[in-house]
Image (cartoon, grey):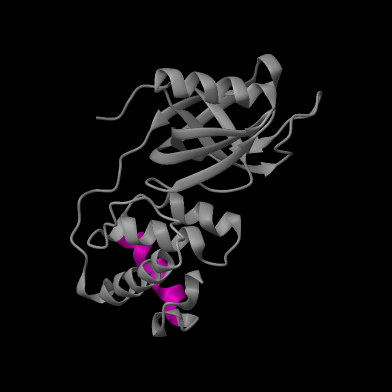
Amino acid sequence: MIEDVHELPLFPLRTVLFPGGLLALRVFEARYMDLVTRCLKTGEEFGVVLILDGNEVHEPGTTVRLAAVGCRARVLDVDMQQPGLLQVRCKGGGRFMLHSHAQGALGLQTGRIQATVDDLPAVLDARHVAAAMALGRAIAALDAQGQKPFLPPYRLDLPGWVANRWAEVLPIGQLARQRLMELPDGTQRLDVVQRYLRQHGILDGAHALQ
């Protein structure tokens, strides 16, 4: 069931968060330190939305233009290695449509959002096995090096999960990444990703994440 329109605090960024994705943030602005602290205590989420025009750091009197679709984020853990700087890890949740947004206290953006339908359960099609296997090899190679860019469980059997993880690491622009994130069907998303992988010879090895 699709939710009604409601308010959600926003964290506009020049990057795209995918459902199930891992997002690392360095937080130093008061507006976001307050937001992260509150979310850590209460378990509430915030929305990550791509900045199309404007700056991540708040400047009085300026505005930002945001993408129409964003992704919820849940705080996993927070570390303060030095005063005034939080190292935050977040996990991407469901996507949402951003109907409008307004700037409030300390420059924090609040959006009126409506959840969209998650990827429907789907079996990995035979034509996508190569993309899933290449991703699995790359994950294993990175794990052996102590690098973990993705959050477990590794759902190599789900087309949407495979597409999302590839889309996070491919050398493409943020607008292209945003368009992929907005595609409502995981299988369709993986079709687009696999076409890119074949065109660039990435399916021949696991070097893409290295």
Residue 111 seen in this snapshot: no
Name the residue furthest top.
Answer: 105
Name the residue furthest front.
Answer: 81
Residue 101 seen in this snapshot: yes
Estimate the x, y position of residue 198 in percent, counting from the top left.
Answer: 42, 80
- Position of residue 134 relative to residue 68, above or below, is below
Q: Report which quarter residue 102 is drawn in.
A: top right
Q: Nearer the viewer, residue 35 or 180?
A: 35
Estimate the x, y position of residue 153 in percent, counting from the top left.
Answer: 28, 52
Q: Nearer the viewer, residue 137 or 19?
A: 137
How many dots with numbers? 0
Residue at 57 percent of width and 67 percent of height: 171
The boundaries of the magenta stretch are: 187-198
Residue at 25 percent of width and 58 percent of height: 158
- Position of residue 44 relative to residue 152, above or below, is above
Estimate the x, y position of residue 42 in percent, counting from the top left.
Answer: 41, 18
Residue at 44 percent of width and 49 percent of height: 182
Instruction: Let me know if residue 193 is in the magenta part.
Output: yes
Estimate the x, y position of residue 51 in percent, counting from the top left.
Answer: 64, 42
For residue 168, side relative to residue 186 (left or right): right
Residue at 53 percent of width and 48 percent of height: 16
For residue 120, side relative to residue 88 (left or right): left
Q: Report which quarter residue 41 is drawn in.
A: top left
Majority SS type along the magenta span: helix
Which image quarter holds the N terminus? top left
